[in-house]
Image (cartoon, rainbow, N blue to C red):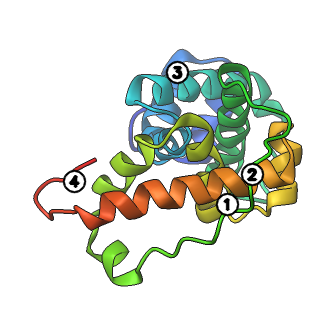
Amino acid sequence: MHYSEKSTDEDLIQGCLQKHRLAQKYLYQKYYGRMLGIGMRYTANRAEAEDILNRAFLKVFNAIVQYKPTGTLSGWIAKIVFNTAIDYVRRHTKYHAVMDFQQEKEVNISAAAIDQLYAEDLYQAIQKLPGTSRTVFSLYVIDGYKHREIAEMLNINSNTSKWHLANAKKFLQEALKNYDRSKIAL
């Protein structure tokens, strides 16, 4: 079979099952952009996100036999990328098991300010958050996990998760105060 950027997911899956490099290449290229965004939410730069993506696709190629067509291929790949990103964060970030901070007040970010941000600017602002706060913010705000779930995922205390979310919101609030549509000032 000949593989190209126009190959269907089914054709690419069959090629990947047979370990055809061209099928793997086109599957990677097809989902690169969408999956890179997942890695970008949990890393400080594009190089780290690409590292996560490459590790995740190795897992995809090795586990493609386990893919069940009951869900979408993109959803299955996204779950692998997400889990790879969380593993990366666990390996590269040192957390304190318990932090004795007073419970921080909830910091609200105005919806109007967020609406003004371009998606690219928002990703850049999130990437400039301190690593632990960035991870907790992404898991809570973007992916919808609860603090209890985040604490279990990252092996931290639930109150530590809450503190990091408040810290991230404070950081972003400060960035939004100085937001200029032409350039985000952090």
In the image, what residue occupies the spot 83% across and 43% down?
153
Earlier along the polypeptide chain: callout 4 or callout 2?
2
In the image, what residue occupies the spot 74% across and 57% down?
102
Earlier along the polypeptide chain: callout 4 or callout 1?
1
Quote the CA–CA distance across marks 4 and 2.
26 Å
Q: Are marks 1 and 2 in contact (CB under 8 Å)?
A: yes
Earlier along the polypeptide chain: callout 1 or callout 2?
1
Pointer 3: what residue? Answer: 51
Q: Amino acid at mark 3?
A: Asp
Pointer 1: what residue? Answer: 140
Earlier along the polypeptide chain: callout 3 or callout 1?
3
Q: Nearer the viewer, residue 135 or 55?
A: 135
Q: Residues within 10 Å of mark 2 (few under 14, many from 20)?
A: many
Q: Quadrant of residue 122?
A: bottom left
Q: Amino acid at mark 1?
A: Tyr
Q: Secondary structure at mark 4?
A: loop
Quote the CA–CA distance across marks 3 and 4.
26 Å
- Label annotation for residue 184: 4
Rendered location of residue 98, percent (x, y): 85, 39
Earlier along the polypeptide chain: callout 3 or callout 2?
3
Quote the CA–CA distance across marks 3 and 1.
23 Å
Single out the mark in the foreground, 1 or 2: 2
Q: Amino acid at mark 2?
A: Ser
Rendered location of residue 13, percent (x, y): 65, 37
Pointer 2: what residue? Answer: 161
Quote the CA–CA distance across marks 4 and 1.
23 Å
